[in-house]
Image (cartoon, grey):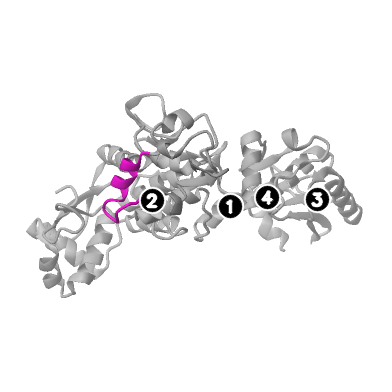
Amino acid sequence: MKLLDILKQPEGKTLEYKRDLSSTDGFLRTVVAFANTGGGIVLIGVEDETRHITGVADPHALQKRAANLIHDGVAPRVLPDMEILAYRNEQVLSVQIHPSSLRPHCLSSVGEDSGTYVRVGSTNRRADAALVAELKRYSRGESFDEWPMPDLDSEALDFRLASESFADYRQLRPGDLSTLRLITTYQNKEVPTVGGILLFGKDRLRHFPDAFVQAGRFQGTDRSVMLDHIELKGSLIEAIDEAIAFVEKHSVHGFTIGRTRRVERWSLPPAALREAVINAVAHADYSQSGAPIRLAMFDDRLEVENPGLLPFGMTVQELSLGVSRIRNRVIGRVFQELRLVEHWGTGVERMLTACRDAGLAEPEFQEIGMRFRVTFRLGQESAPQLDVTDAQIMEFICDAGGVGTKEIAAHIGLTVRATRTRLAALVDRGLLVEIGTGRHDPGRKYFAAGN
């Protein structure tokens, strides 16, 4: 571990600087929060604001003291890795805490109810009862949406709604409700799971009043003036399409592509928007109360926000590396069946790629309070990247207007199948619009977006 490499980073979810150990309570809260969340390093002998290296007088004595504090002050027990790091004539103590499988950890002197902390950004937040319960479920390998709802029976599910949702893919049979974990057996009785009620419950909002999507369009760059607002309280699956339609209705168009034609496009690639909304619904922490899933659109950005921190053990930096953990297994299984998601862990990568290809800044990922937010910046950074073949497709469609797949394939000299793959990617990037009776319509036509 190199001290200078660490010092290049600001304090955050996995890093904290301390000048000394004068505040033992603050140190122990950080140890607990790191163990409960994504792990982290405490550097003792560094000023937190300036990152100036002040050093410690007796690093070996400090190491022993820190080890004793952690041993006596944290329950269950945490085993840190400690290392003395040198810089010129100064020495710094590094205390590394690993993500723990024994969550929740708490301050021994206070107990679990009041002494459990999690890391949010560069701060330690005390966990309430719902978050402590989530920590326990995570340690047991359970998800909240798999839990039974024993006060209800299977009639609480709307089988017609579920069947209609699956109609394009397969016929849903009553026995499939168990396979999909929409219902489960509890004390010899079939009852719905939390996920079953969230997706197909007849009275979802009575049980989970915040399980809906709220979308707003604001004037300018703050929330002082709202221009349009909608609350999507139908099924969560329907809300995904309706939320995307709301954003597209308020999207700005316009960008020049190609040598001879101006082609308008969505200010945000549909593929990126789709992934963000689906992820917000699929990964929301529905055990929380107080606020729904929210989409806030401004002149310069779109914010997609859901209740719940990242799954414990994950950091924001890991998202772009394809690391993924499923918070809601029932919802995830159903979304895969409905092809709303392809492979878990690829959604963030598709968001990044779609924005990069469209010439936009990469989306920003943040934990704010007890919520997770994705922010898309809508200002153009560079021209959308098109290879030679895609540029040829765009120019042909701009010149010809609505064109079918076979015509395009003949023009560019590729097979129909290869051409269809390219066209789908251009639609996802917001450069083309596909018009037809459905995804399997052989006569569907392609138009330049906005033309």
Q: Position of residue 300 (x, y in %)?
A: 37, 39
Residue bearing the label numbered 2: 275
Q: Which residue is mark 3?
A: 77
Say left or right for 216 vs 191.
left
Indicate the secondary structure of the residue bearing disc 1.
loop
Q: Earlier in the sequence, mark 2 or mark 4?
A: 4
Q: Reading the chain from its start, which is encountered first: label 3 or label 1?
A: 3
Label 1 vs 2, first from the N-terminus: 2
Are dots 4 and 1 in contact, CB under 8 Å? no
Foreground mark, 3 or 2, reads 3
Callout 1 amino acid = Thr
Which amino acid type is marked by label 4? Leu
- Residue bearing mark 1: 315
Residue 160 included in the magenta stretch of the image: yes
The disc placed on residue 15 is 4
Question: On the picture, is 443 further left or further right than 151?
Answer: left
Measured in 3D between alpha carbons, the distance from the residue under mark 3 to the one under mark 4, in whole angstroms, is: 21 Å
Q: Which residues are magenta?
A: 158-173
